[in-house]
Image (tube, coloured by chain):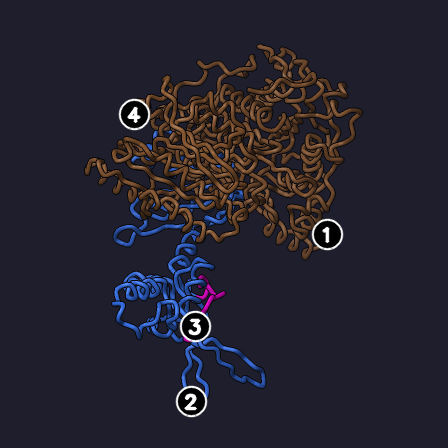
Chain colours: A brown, B blue
Amino acid sequence: MPDAPTSPISSRARLIFSPEELNYDFGPDHPLQARRLVALMDLLETSGLWQSSDEQARLSSRAATIEELNLIHTSDYIAAVQRLSIAEGAGETETEQRKQLALQYGFGDGDTPALPDMHHVCAHIAGGSLVALSAVMGLPEGGTFATEDERPLHVFHPAGGLHHAWADRASGFCIYNDISVAIAHVLQATEAKVLYIDFDAHHGDGVQRAFYDDPRVMTISLHETGRYLFPGTGDVLEVGSGLGRGYSVNVPLEPFTEDDSYIEVIEALLHPLVTSFAPDVIISQHGCDTHAWDPLTHLKLTLRGIQAQIKLAHQLAHSYCQGRWVALGGGGYDLFRVVPRAWSMLWAEMSEQALPINLPEEWIARWRPEWLAVEEQEVAAQQVMGKISALDFPTIFQDRPEDFPEQPRRLSISRSNRHTMGLVRHMLVPPSVRQAFPSAQRRSPLAGLIDLLHLRGSATPSRSKTLETKKGPLLLRDFCPPSLVERLVADSGLQAFARLPEREHQLLLGIARNPDCALTLAHTPTGAIVGEVTLAPGDVWWEGIENVYEVAIEVSSNWRGLGIAHSLLAFALELDALEDMILFAMGLSWHWDIEGIGLSVYRYRELIARLFASQGFVEYPTTEPNISMEPANVLLARIGSRVDQRVVSQFYSRMMSSPNLARL
Amino acid sequence: MIVSEIMTSKLVTVTADDTLSRAANLLRQFQIHQLPVVRHAHTKEQGMQKSLLLLEGLLTSQDIDLAMALEKQSSSSDVIRRPWHEQRVVEVMHRATIRVTPTTSVAAAAQVLVERGLNCLPVVEYEYTEHETQTVLVGLLTRSDLLIALARSMGAFEPGMQLIITLPLGDLTPLAQTLLLAKQLHVQVRSIMATPLEGGIPHAAILRLGTINPAPLLVRLQEAKIEYTFADPLEEGNIHA
């Protein structure tokens, strides 16, 4: 649902490319070669998607300064890169020292060999990403523009995306982490929150490390599981540390994942995650080594999946960040058949141009021979990774479905991915946001229950009650229909879950529309929502147990300490069917407004336990992964007196079941 | 591997005279489950003042739980008994007589932990001064330390990919060949684990390789007919029991 762009988009998308960046080349025997960028630029020009002479579609870049690199990289690492950049001097001690340096800083293996002049080249790439992000954020480093309308909204920097570099080490073909440098610059210069989405087949470990404890940067990485693949990290349980807990999101996909499963995962996860974070800008890394022809990974996407990913990033930028979006390149080792087409697609989407059907003939004539020269090597590498072997050179932009035979075990792969998705949803999306984005497959078989019990949506009005508080009267309403929520606005202090009141209102609307959920609101006579209780069927973890509902509650920070939570909860739970239901609430310490209330997490925990205890909720120990992750978290449940004993014991055993989701 | 390589040496401690309330606060604040109880001593060594931590005992969160539970049970007429948080550490601590030294092997320490059902072991050195033996606390070895050591020895903290080499009948030749090939191809080996499962013979070696580009090595392994596992398209995912 992108908002309509206010100005012609053609002038608002720009591309950064400088010939300097072509020197980032590890030589003919290395998987990463700058020829892929030459092929990309050639394809963009010959297909008329981008002209190097068009000033309006180009953004000039510069090298990053040492101070800028220093935002992420340690001084000794930068010094070592500079030292290894210059040609080797004579002498044995010199050779020995260089060897020592190379080993210490990650240049000691075949992956990331030291290149002549690499400091300069990598600083240039880091500078490109920094300029790109600064430009969309309106910072002076992004260049000056005649009018605000000329300032680019989207920038594409195909040479960027070097996400494996650590603060003090080169790793996985990456030397300076251009992404982290660009983000760190924006963090320093503005108060913005930055969302980083990593679509590369490898885990974006360098960027995640750089901002692991920073709540202003959410990193989302979708990658092939690290069970076998480099860099081995990126488990769902890596969720950030300290204040940044809950701001690192990892979605490890099964090897041999195909388009349908991939699209299902990204569409179900990205919207709720982005809603809950409410970023000011999106920076995405579009490594296309996820493709079925890529010789370095096991993922098996086609350009259909990659296009869905690109479109989604574009859509998210417009729905959540007023269009501010920087896209970067990244991995992609089928240099001539996949990389140019995938990233042309990205540029076409960004600049809102229609993609032609056929690849230009002159382009094919130029690049097919280059591919033929390396074909044999590539086929061998693909086969060894368990992928289908090569067909001919493509002649159209899109992939033809018939070239990609169905993967054996497709079902079990997509089922595993669905588990991962459920786990991520469960652990990292706050309960109320989750309920606003019901997952399509998981519509509860008991969805009709609430309707049956309460005649929702019919002419019967929901109950209402007036509550007198010291700050004035409040109206409590249960089973709020969407039409009511539309007429109300969210109070400015209502932001625990979506972090922005307007967004919270959207969420509430989503919950009101969701037939599975019941929404109880407290609002002022003037129509400001100051509190909410949601009641919805339990998530994946509780699947299969009858009548299990999750309760979530929030009160605006402007209306705390007035006993609203108690009254609202009591009111919401005045249900005829209360004794037939198992209700539970999850207290996750990373969602708590600790600073706002000025309590320690443990006091807050007690507060929540007391609040729910007033309605007969009792604290239970559980192995539920979310709760057991952090000692302050708490599971509170209320088991109705008429609930069948069999269901109760099912519930108990589920609470303590082993957390690997094996029963699914 | 010896204990001093993996133990925790930055310690949070209490003294025997501290109250349980202080101890409980420390346990919470640092999110730990045991506190060594120490006495501070000063010795003069070649004219230099040296401060030592002498081990008195160990206080665990279970001891505090027990103190609280006892208080709840005791009848209201029991006026002598103080509330749990006013009790002194010395009243509930253990003497912690099972200890290890920094040079104890990790394997032996792990066995002690498991066999005695302990969660941690104080690491001590004995100093002979002024005609008496003093027990100086130098560290604490917890189950977490052992787990971290295990993860580290599997190479988990270094970026890398995992390859499993099959060793038929415990024959180490395929492993040796693989290592040679890795050397030739400039592939760094981050860690090697060949764990004996039965009869003391390892049947597979788990290698963590510091490369993002496994294909050249895998091609060479296939040419050399070395059996390996690296995400097989037909292999059933291990999520399904």
Q: Badge 4 sits on which subunit?
A: A
Q: Residues within 10 Å of mark 1 (few under 14, many from 20)?
A: few
Q: What residue type is labelled 1?
A: Ala
Q: What residue type is labelled 4?
A: Leu
Front: mark 2 or 4 = 4
Q: Can residue A477 be seen in this view?
A: yes
Instruction: Respond whether the residues carrying marks 4 and 3 are from the same subunit.
Output: no
Judged from the image, the secondary structure of the residue bearing numbered disc 4 is helix
Q: Which amino acid does label 3 sit on?
A: Asp
Quadrant hosting residue A110:
top right
Task: Say which quadrant the N terminus of chain B sits in.
Answer: bottom left
| Gap in angstroms between the C-alphas marked 2 and 4 | 82 Å
Tag of residue B131: 2
Residue matched to label 4? A453
- Let me know if residue B7 is in the magenta part: yes
3 or 2: tag closer to the N-terminus: 3
Q: Does residue A227 lie above or below A300 as drawn?
A: below
Q: Name the magenta segment's main secondary structure.
A: loop
Task: Say which quadrant the C terminus of chain B sits in.
Answer: top left
| Gap in angstroms between the C-alphas marked 3 and 1 | 65 Å
Residue positioned 70% across, 27% down in the render: A17
